[in-house]
């Protein structure tokens, strides 16, 4: 089987990390991937390192008809049995390109609609209308990465018979607790001082400024705590300024974009998320894979990941409660260790990449089998 994976590709965030995993694991189950991107970036570089063919679809504008012709030719030339899109731009483009193609179209929806207002909100509404129309065709399947998201898509008009649930997953790695000491040396952390990590895009939807407020509240209780920030984005400088104003600069490490997050997870006591909404975030799964508890608001798919794990969820935008959960873990090392072990067990039970790929390939075969 051959699959054409299509995404925008400009940045490297959750979608791109997901595609990286697919490009690594699909060949192991007999599926040959080919990557198409609308912009070259870290994702294309990742594909090239893995030996996966990469093609850029060049667009002069968002609705460039020549891009549709390029996409149609690429689908034919690659011999793709399945075209698997990620993001509304890729989905709308390939739906137009494949109207007369024998290839099946599968799209993965990774998260809820991000809030936009004014003209940007109108444009997004139009784009998502086109996206929903693209999901309605024959030989189409729409993969939701969480049950909450699947229900949201159904409420937005995506036919239920097209919807399939395939939880995100990340490849398992051995949990090496010796990495904790190495990670702490690398980050210049004291061996036993508390440390909390924020990992992700520094954009409004992730609300990184709330992590600074979280840090203030925790620092008031435990002044030897260090706060680690791994990520890039437009809110980096506002974060730095707020940290400076609060006098917390000596307690923060701004690490930028990290290709390898495992040493960070090993060094941290827990990972903290302050997102306003989420799908099934890979950051949470990676932290759990490392045996680290994730403190997060109960938004989007986060309750599906963390529900039932004692003391890890707070109400949406309740930074004070998040800080209280962190302090509770800091004050009880046995509870912290128990929470980390429970997070690892939940990951192994439900969120491995192997299970994700098996379920996804089943969706591919189902879409291929449907008569046109």
Image (cartoon, rainbow, N blue to C red):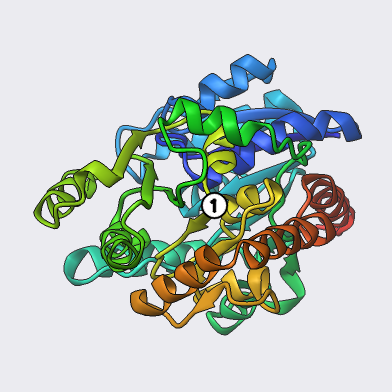
The quarter of the image holding the N terminus is top right
Q: Which residue is mark 1?
A: 269
In front of the other: 321 or 91: 321
| Residue 132 in sight from this viewpoint | no
How many numbered markers are drawn? 1
Query: Outermost residue, left direction?
Result: 245
The x, y position of residue 93, in whole percent, is 50, 46
Does residue 322 appear left or right of residue 334 in this picture? Answer: left
Which residue appears at 34% of the width and 44% of the height?
62
Q: Residue 267: name its quadrant.
A: top right
| Image-based side of 159 in relation to 39, left or right | right
- Residue placed most toward the observer, 354 or 106: 354
Asked if residue 320 is positioned above or below residue 105 in the image, the reply reads: below
Categorize mark 1 by other alpha carbons within 10 Å: few (<14), some (14-19), many (20+).
Answer: many
Q: Is residue 227 left or right of residue 265?
A: left
Frontmost residue, 196 versus 99:
196
Coordinates of residue 158 in the picture (x, y in percent): 61, 75
Find residue 163 and report its image quarter.
bottom right
**Residue in view at x 61 percent, y 63 percent:** 135
In the rendered image, which quarter is residue 249 located in?
top left
Quadrant of the image for the C terminus? bottom right
Please report the residue visible at 29 percent of the width from the left and 69 percent of the height from the top: 217
Please state the horizontal and vertical placement of residue 242, each as a whole percent of the image: 15, 55
Say above or below: 201 vs 150. above
Query: From this viewpoint, is residue 85 visible?
Result: yes
Q: Is residue 78 above or below residue 137?
A: above
Q: Is 104 in front, or is 212?
A: 212
Considering the numbered disc 1 on the image, is that residue within a helix, a strand or a loop?
A: loop
């Amino acid at each position: 089987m051959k699959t054409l994976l299509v995404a925008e590709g400009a940045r490297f965030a959750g979608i791109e990390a997901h595609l990286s995993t697919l490009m690594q694991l699909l060949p192991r189950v007999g599926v040959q991937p080919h990557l198409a991107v609308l912009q070259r970036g870290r994702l294309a570089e990742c594909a090239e390192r893995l030996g996966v063919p990469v093609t850029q679809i060049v667009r002069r504008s968002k609705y460039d008809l020549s891009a549709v012709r390029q996409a149609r030719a690429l689908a034919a030339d690659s011999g793709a049995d399945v075209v698997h899109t990620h993001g509304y731009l890729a989905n709308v483009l390939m739906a137009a390109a494949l109207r007369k193609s024998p290839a099946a179209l599968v799209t993965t929806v990774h998260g809820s609609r991000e809030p936009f207002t004014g003209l940007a909100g109108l444009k997004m509404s139009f784009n998502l209308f086109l996206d929903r129309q693209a999901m309605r065709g024959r030989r189409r399947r729409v993969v939701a990465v969480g049950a909450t998201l699947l229900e949201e898509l159904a409420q937005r008009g995506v036919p239920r018979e097209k919807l399939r649930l395939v939880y995100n997953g990340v490849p398992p790695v051995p949990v090496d607790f010796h990495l904790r000491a190495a990670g702490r040396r690398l980050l210049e952390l004291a061996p036993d001082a508390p440390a909390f990590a924020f990992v992700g895009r520094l954009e409004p939807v992730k609300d990184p400024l709330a992590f600074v407020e979280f840090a203030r509240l925790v620092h008031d209780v435990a002044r030897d705590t260090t706060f680690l920030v791994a990520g890039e984005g437009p809110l980096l400088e506002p974060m730095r300024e707020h940290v400076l104003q609060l006098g917390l600069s000596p307690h923060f490490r701004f690490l930028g974009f990290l290709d390898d997050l495992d040493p960070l997870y090993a060094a941290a006591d827990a990972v903290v998320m302050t997102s306003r909404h989420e799908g099934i975030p890979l950051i949470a799964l990676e932290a759990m894979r490392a045996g680290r508890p994730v403190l997060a608001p109960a938004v989007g798919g986060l309750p599906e990941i963390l529900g039932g794990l004692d003391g890890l969820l707070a109400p949406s935008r309740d930074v004070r409660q998040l800080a209280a959960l962190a302090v509770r873990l800091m004050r009880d090392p046995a509870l912290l260790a128990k929470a980390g072990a429970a997070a690892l067990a939940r990951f192994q039970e439900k969120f491995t990449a192997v299970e994700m790929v098996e379920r996804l390939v089943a969706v591919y075969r189902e879409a291929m089998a449907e008569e046109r």
